[in-house]
């Protein structure tokens, strides 16, 4: 099952890399493709942020949490400005913070108990 999921996510990533530029060439850069490009760029940054979990420090989880939150906030601010021409920080933070914390907690427990991120004995 783990290999099947790995292959599915690999195919999604490769499909995005291959077909998004082709869709842009065929259909032009519309709002949907801008959203897909933002999602794709954020996914790359989130993927790179997992290298922080290989640090040999007890602070690797808080560092990873903060880097992911900053990326999420930056993407949300950028997309809000792109789509509306302005940013309502209060509304943005009221929506982003609880959703991000819930998703990160789920992801953290998955990484901790089922993932491949190994912990030191003294964690």
Image (cartoon, rainbow, N blue to C red):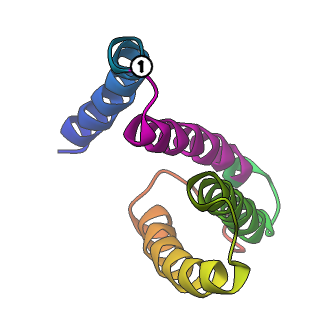
Tell me the residue at 25%/44% (across/down). Answer: 2
Residue 100: percent from the left, percent from the top?
A: 54, 75
Magenta span main SS? helix
Task: Name the secondary structure under disc 1.
Answer: helix
Residue to which mark 1 is pinned? 24
Figure quadrant of residue 91: bottom right
Quadrant in the picture for the C terminus: bottom right
Residue 93 lies left or right of residue 27; in this view the side is right
Residue 7 lies left or right of residue 16; in this view the side is left
How crowded pointer 1 is (Cα within 10 Å; few <14, some 14-19, many 20+) is rated as: few
- For the view shown, which residue lies furthest in the front direction? 85
Tell me the residue at 47%/81% (across/down). Answer: 102
User: Magenta span has 30?
Assistant: yes
Tell me the residue at 72%/74% (across/down). Answer: 122
Q: Compared to 39, does 13 lie above or below?
A: above
Can residue 67 be seen here? The reply is yes
Residue 11: percent from the left, percent from the top?
A: 29, 27
Quadrant in the picture for the N terminus: top left
Q: Which residues are magenta?
A: 28-52
């Amino acid at each position: 099952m783990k290999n099947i999921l790995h292959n599915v996510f690999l195919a999604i990533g490769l499909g995005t890399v291959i077909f998004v530029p082709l869709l842009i060439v065929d259909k032009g850069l519309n709002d949907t493709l801008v959203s897909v490009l933002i999602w794709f760029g954020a996914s790359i940054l989130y993927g790179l942020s997992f290298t922080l979990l290989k640090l040999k420090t007890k602070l690797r989880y808080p560092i990873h949490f903060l880097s992911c939150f900053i990326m999420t906030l930056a993407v949300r601010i950028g997309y809000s400005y792109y789509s509306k021409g302005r940013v309502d920080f209060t509304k943005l933070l009221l929506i982003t913070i609880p959703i991000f914390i819930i998703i990160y907690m789920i992801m953290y427990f998955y990484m901790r108990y089922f993932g491949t991120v190994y912990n030191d004995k003294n964690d």
